[in-house]
């Protein structure tokens, strides 16, 4: 479900499932927590392959935000219009830096 790539300044966590919903939310949170236990770095959460998020998936994303501590320790990459609309509707985009691509998130780190 998660592919992790560690670099000196950040950890890229790519969600490889198309749907972040009630079926996978608990596993997602567990795997994300393990990543945080293993790495102490800025986290880029890549949701570019995710096309659907339900309320359980949204709660899991908020969990990621809370686990990283503060806004400047997490960036989200999302390009799907439905996912972006959900982030805007819930005003999550006001709390977390959201970028349309991994490259743009990494550029913002510079």
Image (cartoon, grey):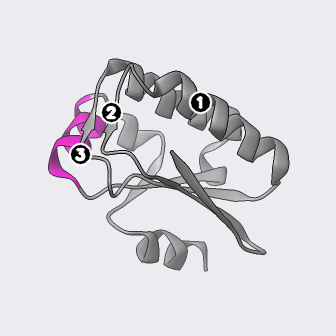
For marks 3 and 2, the one nearer the N-term is 3
Q: Residues within 10 Å of mark 1 (few under 14, many from 20)?
A: some
Q: Secondary structure at mark 2?
A: loop
Along the line of sight, the residue nearer the viewer: 18 or 87: 18
Q: Which residue position holds label 1?
A: 29
Q: Which residue is depicted at the point 30% across and 45% down?
A: 18
Secondary structure mostly seen in magenta is helix
- Report the span colored magenta: 80-89
- How far apart are the alpha carbons under marks 3 and 2? 18 Å
Which of pointers 3 and 2 indicates the residue nearer the eye? 3
- The structure residue drawn at horizontal position 40% and vertical position 27%, both measured from the top left corner, is 57
In the figure, residue 5 lies in which quadrant?
bottom right
Q: Would residue 19 appear left or right of 28 to someone viewing this image?
A: left
Q: Which comes before the other along the chain, label 2 or label 1?
A: 1
Which of the two labelled residues, at mark 3 and mark 1, occupies the earlier sequence position?
Answer: 1
Q: Position of residue 110 (x, y in %)?
A: 61, 80
Place of residue 41 in the rendered image (x, y in percent of width and height, measured from the top left): 76, 59
Quickly name the residue at label 2. Answer: 91
Was residue 87 drawn as part of the magenta stretch in this picture?
yes
Give x and y (percent) for residue 54: 29, 24
Identify the element where label 1 is drawn. Answer: helix
- Say which residue label 3 marks: 51
Q: Tell me the element at label 3.
A: loop
> Which residue appears at 48% of the width and 45% of the height?
96
- The residue under the point 31% across, 47% down is 50
105 in relation to 78, above or below: below
Taking depth in this image into account, of 16 and 82 the one nearest to the observer is 16
């Amino acid at each position: 479900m998660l592919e992790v790539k560690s670099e000196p300044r950040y950890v890229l966590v790519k969600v490889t499932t198309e749907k972040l919903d009630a079926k996978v939310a608990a596993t997602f949170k567990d795997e994300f927590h393990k990543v945080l236990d293993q790495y102490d770095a800025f986290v880029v959460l890549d949701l570019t392959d995710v096309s659907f998020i339900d309320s359980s998936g949204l709660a899991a994303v908020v969990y990621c935000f809370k686990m990283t501590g503060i806004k400047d320790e997490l960036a989200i990459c999302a390009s799907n219009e439905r996912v972006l609309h959900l982030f805007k509707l819930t005003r999550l985009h006001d709390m977390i830096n959201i970028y349309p691509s991994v490259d743009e998130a990494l550029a913002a780190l510079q």
